[in-house]
Image (cartoon, rainbow, N blue to C red):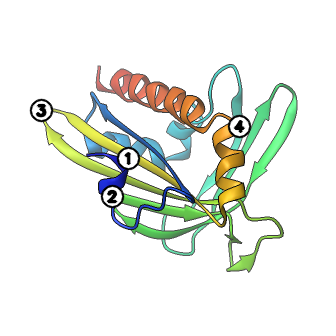
Amino acid sequence: MTPQDLPDFDPDLDLVLQRDLNAPRELIYACWTTPEHLVHWFVPKPHRVTACHLDVRVGGACNTTFDVDGAVMENRGVYLEVVPNEKLVFTDTYTEGWKPAAEPFMTAILTFQDLGQGRTRYTAIARHRNADTAKQHAEMGFHDGWGTVATQLEAYARGLMT
């Protein structure tokens, strides 16, 4: 499957990363929805997650704080769609309580497809409000950064399997 095969794909607004991971989708999903797991893999190392609050339900908080080279980066958002083990959609357009964010950046659409034999097709779409924001995200290193994180996610999940 190519990004163009994805429903509603817009090449001007959407950035896509798709990987086949060697871990079962229930575990990949758990790593995305459990703060105690997420903090171990969610940002490219040596950066780190310093705080994480996830209330995995529609309208629930999806909040993370990162330390990136000594700079604190706070990400506040909400879940828009939750289908256990299949799909997560969250955005920084709103914060908990449906309060509009001052400067929204993107909506993330994550899908987890069971490929059998303990493998998962992981698709991450970063959808942006306009082409300039999508271009900015691409230039910030979306594919390298999210690719590194997918590799870290797979390694972390596999470590939980032993």
Q: CA distance from mark 2 to mark 3?
A: 24 Å
Dot 4 falls on a residue whose secondary structure is loop
Residue 82: image x %, image y %? 41, 66
Q: Which of the numbered marks, if any, corresponds to residue 123? A: 1
Q: Which of the numbered marks, if any, corresponds to residue 6? A: 2
Dot 3 falls on a residue whose secondary structure is loop
First along the sequence among labels 2 and 3: 2
Residue 55: image x %, image y %? 55, 63
Query: CB atoms at circles 2 and 1 under 8 Å apart?
Result: yes
Residue 150: image x %, image y %? 46, 32
**Label 1 Cα crowd, 10 Å radius (few <14 / some 14-19 / many 20+):** some
Q: On the image, numbered disc 3 is attached to which residue?
A: 117
| Kind of residue at disc 4 | Met
Dot 2 falls on a residue whose secondary structure is loop
**Label 2 Cα crowd, 10 Å radius (few <14 / some 14-19 / many 20+):** few
Task: Name the front one of labels 1 and 4.
Answer: 4
Residue occupying the point 28% across, 41% down = 121
Q: Quadrant of the C terminus?
A: top left
| Kind of residue at disc 3 | Gln
Q: On the image, numbered disc 4 is attached to which residue?
A: 140
Query: CB atoms at circles 2 and 4 under 8 Å apart?
Result: no
Q: CA distance from mark 1 to mark 4?
A: 19 Å
| Kind of residue at disc 1 | Thr
